[in-house]
Amino acid sequence: MAGRISKQTIEAVQKTADIVQIVGEYTKLEPRGSDWWGCCPFHGEKTASFHVEPDKRFYYCFGCHAGGDVIKFVMEQEKLSYSQAIESLAKRYGVPVQYEDGYEPKEDTQAKLKNDYIELYERTSGMFHYLLTQTEQGKGALKYILDRGLSLETVNKFKLGYAPSDRRWLKDFLLKKNFSKEFLENSGLFSKKYPDVCLYSNRLMFPIFNRDGKVVAFGGRQLVNEVNSPKYLNSPDLIQYKKEDTLFAFNFAKKAIKDNKKVIFCEGYMDCIAYHQCGIEYAVAPLGTALTEDQIKIIRPFVDEVLLSFDSDSAGQKATLRAILMLRKAGLTVKVIRLEGGKDPAEIMINYGKETLTGYVSNAIVDSDFLLSKLGKEYPIDTPEGKTKASLAFFPYVDSLQSDIMKESCLEQLCQTFNLKPEAVKRDFLNREQARNRLNFRQPENNQKNIPAVKLTAELRSVLAIIAHIDKYNIVRNELTSQDFEDPAAQRLFIVLEECYQDGSLSLTGVLNHCKDERLSNLVTSVISTGEFNDDNADSVQDSIKLLKRRSLERQREKLMQRIRSFNVVTADDQNQLTALLTEKMELDKKLKS
């Protein structure tokens, strides 16, 4: 059959490919006699039931019964077709691929495009790194990162970089390197609205690597606070990069994770890098604080224990609770690192040194102790109602545990901590939904504050309409930027939407979690709950876009007119500049009339 890979090639791949090496990249294997054993990478387990027989070039799991040769393993793990898996292994081990009947394969355009974008990001990363470490314009950024306690060795290891203030420089540079305009415009490096403008300006750049150590995306941190721009700006999902199944620094950490059988999940890039510089090299970071199931699957086969190191602020504590429940449901043991004397690991490292940070890791507490301590502070446990609420808040954790013995033990711990009778706690646990309804369970009243109202301007109403139809934000962000707003409150909410979009938490809950201004949070909750922007008013999003674009154009025109009125023509260059301003005014007038 034309197009079929030859039998000789398949046999050569099966014989040449090292199945222990390949499988060992996805789960920790240990030798037992002539075989290798480990936890199955296809299903969650604590006791190793997965084994590889190198002599037979075969793997098999006694738990889920997955089995096959090295080709099937690569197919399953990388989601490739049979021929794609063979071609991938052949390329890795230098086996020439031959086809039957003299067939010449067509180029895999998607695979080529993916590799081309990886090459682009590798090149761009190299240039950002050069600008940070070798140029005058990168000196300020380099001083900032060195002042944060990172060494030059760490800067080089993680290929940290600097994106210059000139937003048009990168496009011009890459065009000179023979990358096409269309290719660059779809790369995720440039604005959709202004394709010649780089997304990153005057930012410290963190390359995001894939499992093989290739740069596939970027995170950019502000070096100067700008109200109308997010602190961190991250690459969107791309053909070579999906944030939900990527972990920052996993390429550096995977050996230490295997060796220590543990992993630290950090909140951000700097925290993760700080741990590595202090010799704790099994630290990784989800891309955004929202840990995903796919990210847990990456580390699941290698670890017995997960340590959480999220920030101590409200958002970090919510991320910690969510991660505990997800990890426990995956059957993993969880501990929480509690930091003192600084908000995050980077601050601990610079203020107190690596030994202090190492000590905090060694003294991480079991998640149940962490939760009970937290609940004891949140609720008035000296009252029956407070004890009941604290217990109801603890029950989801008990639900997430994988064995009845563990559940029983944690309920006993709850009783001892809050001085409760086991019989009563068990009854409420078994009937927890009814108990919640009877108590009308909600957060403590002392968390409620009288907050002054925010003025509901037309711009702010427009953003609220967008939030009410949040699934359409991907359309909105191609039409608007935070620069299109004059009302600071509307601008802040729009930036919150973009941050949620960037870290994969685009939902009403995500907006409320990201919004640090309680007045705006309360406004979002109250206005959305009235149904003013309900499904019957779906045109409100398009109306909002039109209104905001028109207001933005009107402001641009007014600023332009002020410049034109004050312009004093003296030289020929002055006349050329005035002509350019008048041309720009004509273009704005056309847009306003359309």
Image (cartoon, helix red, strand yellow):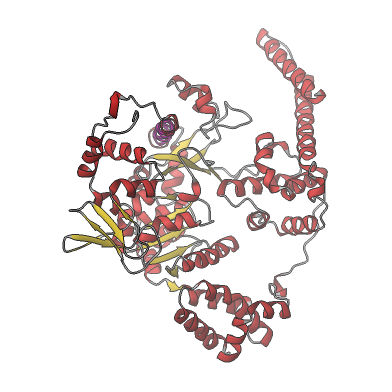
Please, is residue 379 above or below residue 450 in the view?
A: below
- Residue 417 in view: yes
Q: Main secondary structure of the magenta part?
A: helix
Considering only vertical position in the picture, is 590 above or below 358?
Answer: above
Q: Does residue 380 show up?
A: no
The spot of residue 25 in percent (x, y) is: 31, 52
- Give the residue displayed 80% in from the left and 60% down from the top: 452
Horizontal and vertical percent position of residue 311: 52, 61
Residue 375 horizontal side relative to residue 177, left or right: right
Q: Position of residue 477 (x, y in %)?
A: 66, 39
Q: How many marks?
A: 0
Residue drawn 69% across the image and 39% down it: 476
Quarter of the view holding residue 279: bottom left
Q: Residue 513 sits in which quadrant?
A: bottom right
Rendering coords of residue 35 (x, y %): 20, 60
| Residue 474 is inside the magenta segment | no
Q: Is residue 180 left or right of residue 94?
A: right
Q: Looking at the picture, tell me which residue is in the foreground, 291 or 419.
A: 291
Magenta stretch bounds? 115-130
State the residue in front, 454 or 115. 115
